[in-house]
Image: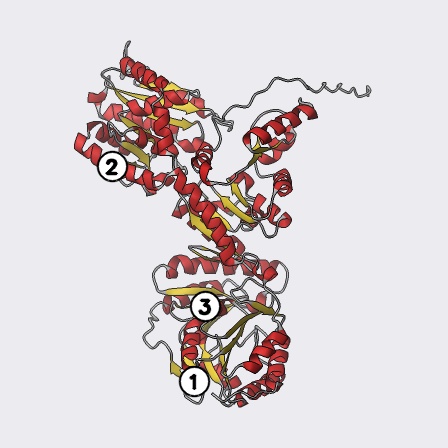
């Protein structure tokens, strides 16, 4: 073989001429939103790439000069990766370069706001470097349904990356719902409409529709070149109705479908031929596709058919970026705007069109698959796949009376005033700070271990003490019936505590009253509660229902769903309580493929319950470590805690629990601090919790109670 030949490397360019200009593509809506509140912020900094610009030919000194200029003049820190790194990583996901740069400039108290799908992994990278930072993530595009997202090979990595943020924001409720359902289904996480409870922290989820800066847009509309372009358009298309549209030439923007719908309009409404022109601006896109050719085929067919003549063509298709003054002139001259993407976020073109129609009030035709549609009830709604419906909407828009136009426009304008750029930016930034401080973010990492000596001091000084304990996982090991040895040591320590007349002791369990009575019924002067607060047995009294009027008509539907998954999950079984139904799968959780399958089945079951039952009945679902329990919405441990607290009126409360069912009780008791002299809430093990302290395990709990029971006491009896 001939010897290999090497190509000499090209010399790097050091004296290249370059300049910095405002971007005309990218996330302009976000930039405008931040600029609209610029005076309200003490300081803000941008971190990002230069876009699809080749940098490999530039010398390091040339790159350094660019970065220094951006930092000094524009408060922007540039990420300058090699071309192959940018193409291979940023165009798909984020790169560690972002995390390194942000960590290098971060100062205590800074808010980090990560934007869009390119950077879904970045929150986790940042959290690893900056554990206590305030981090927000906002998704500007629609979040897909779980059925689509689960097809991604890196689905877990992407979700886990996002879920290290304090706050995750979306444009609409449906986008947020897809995200929550996807997290529940793929990661088996507890979710509510307002957030996701993870083992290590809580992630808030919010809805923040982006908008425009109406005042800034109005100033731009008053520029002389806008008036000049308007005069040119009116002269060129005198006597014609103008329908205006501007879209990127991506498949999801539905430009080809729009052309086909306009063709149907001309076929079905021949009276408009020669009287209406559709001006479609096709913006360049980073996507490489054949869509332009497909669009051009339809445009050529329409313009070379019976609809046109030597002086008239129905469609003007411009595959080019136009200046902003030209764009504003089009919006102000339009008789209708046709915005029909197949899938889209908020689509700020619709907002800008409404703002530009404050004199003529012409109608907006909008796809029902845009995020904007949910707030624009006064637009003409269309399904972009239904060409006949779109054609009918065009006819309706062009034939609409002035009174109806003005009425619809007023409603639309109210929407863009409320959902402005300023409201978008300020709400996210302010809520980020609030969420971070309110949730305590790293619960398990930051809550301290239960301080024994101060606890003993408060215990000794108190006169009326209340103890509220969970049972399984707190006083006895979790996941199985208590052994004789476990019960013996527990009953001994409980008898010591209850023998002190200053102590009121309650065990609040999720187990049935039969099981609780069997295990603990012989302990004198012990208060009991079963089924997470549905039943109560006050000290010295009989069992009674705490909520006698609870609706249980949902139980057959839940049992049917649980039965379906029991048949498909080896070792799983159903436990029917009087107030709830529990699906157990703990016997199949040995490591390996079977455990993975069971975890997947559990996630599917939880989502099935949420979709079929939670929305139709007043119930809530509690996902335990190895079970799923469905119970009435009003059944929780906080209700029992409230009742006992009112009865006892203590000056000292110690509450210990180990799972999600105890969180309502912890949250309620924490709010009593101040009313009650000493309130101590404690979780067993390290996890995210409302509790103020943690204790290692069941053995430590029993040891603690023995220590307290053996302490010398001299307070007055209850």
Distance, label 3 to label 1, CA atoms, is: 23 Å
Q: Name the N-terminal-most of marks 1 and 2.
A: 2
Q: Name the N-terminal-most of marks 2 and 3.
A: 2
Give SS at disc 2: helix
Image coordinates of residue 454 in percent, x first then y, are 60, 74
Task: Give whichever of 564, 695 is nearer the camera.
Answer: 695
The tag on residue 410 is: 2
Q: Which residue is mark 3?
A: 671
Q: Which residue is mark 1?
A: 538
* Mark 2 or mark 3, whichever is nearer to me: 3
* Mark 3 or mark 1, whichever is nearer to me: 3
The tag on residue 66 is: none
Distance, label 2 to label 3, CA atoms, is: 45 Å
Res. 180 in view: yes
- With 568 as the anchor, is 351 left or right in this view? left
Image coordinates of residue 90 in percent, x first then y, are 58, 35
Q: Residue at x 38, y 83 (%)?
A: 544
Give SS at disc 3: loop
Residue 219 falls in image quadrant: top left
Image coordinates of residue 223 in percent, x first then y, are 36, 21
Q: Name the N-terminal-most of marks 3 and 1.
A: 1
Assign the N terminus to one quadrant of the image.
Answer: top right
Task: Give whichever of 501, 705 is nearer the camera.
Answer: 501
């Amino acid at each position: 073989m001939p010897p290999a030949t090497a190509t000499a490397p090209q010399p790097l360019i050091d004296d290249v001429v370059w300049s910095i200009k405002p971007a005309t593509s990218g996330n302009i809506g976000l930039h405008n939103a931040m600029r609209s509140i610029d005076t309200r912020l003490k300081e803000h900094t941008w971190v990002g790439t230069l876009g699809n610009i080749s940098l490999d030919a530039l010398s390091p000194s040339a790159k350094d000069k660019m970065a220094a200029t951006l930092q000094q003049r524009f408060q922007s820190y540039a990420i300058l990766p090699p071309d192959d790194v940018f193409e291979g990583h940023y165009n798909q996901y984020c790169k560690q370069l972002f995390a390194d740069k942000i960590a290098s400039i971060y100062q205590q108290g800074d808010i980090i706001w990560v934007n869009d799908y390119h950077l879904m992994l970045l929150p986790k990278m940042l959290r690893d470097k900056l554990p206590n930072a305030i981090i927000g993530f906002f998704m500007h595009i629609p979040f897909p349904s779980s059925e689509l997202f689960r097809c991604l090979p890196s689905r877990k990595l992407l979700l886990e990356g996002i879920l290290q943020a304090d706050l995750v924001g979306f444009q609409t409720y449906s986008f947020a719902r897809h995200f929550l359902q996807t997290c529940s289904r793929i990661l088996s996480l507890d979710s509510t409409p307002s957030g996701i409870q993870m083992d290590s922290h809580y992630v808030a989820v919010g809805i923040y529709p982006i908008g425009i800066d109406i005042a800034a847009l109005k100033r731009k509309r008053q520029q002389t070149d806008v008036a000049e372009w308007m005069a040119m358009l009116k002269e060129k298309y005198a006597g014609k109705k103008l329908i205006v549209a501007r879209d990127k030439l991506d498949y999801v923007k539905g430009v080809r479908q729009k052309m086909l719908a306009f063709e149907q309009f001309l076929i079905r409404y021949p009276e408009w031929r020669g009287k209406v022109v559709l001006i479609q601006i096709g913006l360049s896109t980073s996507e490489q596709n054949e869509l332009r050719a497909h669009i051009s085929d339809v445009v050529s067919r329409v313009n070379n058919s019976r609809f046109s003549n030597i002086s008239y063509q129905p469609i003007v298709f411009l595959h080019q970026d136009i200046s902003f003054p030209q764009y504003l002139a089009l919006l102000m001259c339009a008789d209708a705007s046709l915005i029909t993407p197949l899938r889209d976020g908020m689509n700020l073109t619709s907002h800008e069109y409404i703002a530009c129609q404050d004199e003529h009030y012409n109608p907006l035709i909008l796809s029902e698959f845009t995020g904007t549609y949910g707030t624009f009830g006064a637009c003409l709604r269309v399904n972009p796949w239904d060409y006949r419906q779109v054609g009918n909407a065009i006819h309706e828009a062009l034939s609409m009376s002035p009174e109806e136009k003005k009425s619809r426009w007023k409603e639309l304008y109210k929407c863009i005033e409320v959902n402005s750029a300023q409201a978008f930016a300020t709400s996210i930034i302010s809520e980020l700070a609030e969420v971070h401080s309110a949730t305590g973010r790293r619960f398990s990492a930051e809550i301290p271990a239960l301080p024994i000596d101060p606890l003993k001091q408060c215990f000794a000084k108190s006169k009326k003490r209340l103890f509220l304990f969970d049972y399984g996982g707190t006083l006895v090991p979790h996941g199985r019936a208590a052994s004789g040895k476990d019960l013996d040591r527990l009953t001994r320590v409980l008898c010591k505590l209850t023998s002190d007349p200053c102590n009121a002791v309650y065990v609040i369990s999720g187990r049935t009253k039969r099981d609780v009575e069997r295990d603990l019924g012989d302990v004198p002067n012990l208060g009991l509660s079963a089924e997470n607060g549905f039943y109560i047995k006050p000290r010295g009294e009989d069992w009674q229902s705490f909520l006698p009027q609870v609706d249980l008509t949902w139980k057959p539907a839940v049992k049917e769903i649980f039965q379906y998954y029991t048949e498909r999950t080896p070792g799983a079984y159903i436990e029917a309580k009087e107030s709830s139904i529990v699906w157990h799968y703990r016997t199949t959780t040995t490591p390996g493929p079977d455990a993975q399958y069971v975890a997947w089945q559990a996630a599917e079951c939880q989502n099935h319950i949420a979709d079929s039952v939670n929305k139709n009945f007043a119930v809530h679902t509690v996902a335990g470590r190895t079970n799923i329990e469905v119970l009435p919405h009003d059944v929780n441990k906080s209700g029992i805690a409230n009742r006992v607290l009112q009865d006892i009126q203590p000056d000292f409360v110690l509450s210990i629990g180990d799972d999600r069912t105890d969180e309502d009780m912890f949250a309620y008791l924490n709010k009593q601090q101040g009313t009650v002299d000493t309130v101590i809430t404690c979780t067993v093990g390290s996890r995210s919790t409302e509790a103020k302290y943690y204790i290692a395990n069941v053995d430590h709990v029993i040891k603690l109670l023995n220590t307290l029971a053996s302490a010398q006491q001299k307070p007055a009896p209850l």
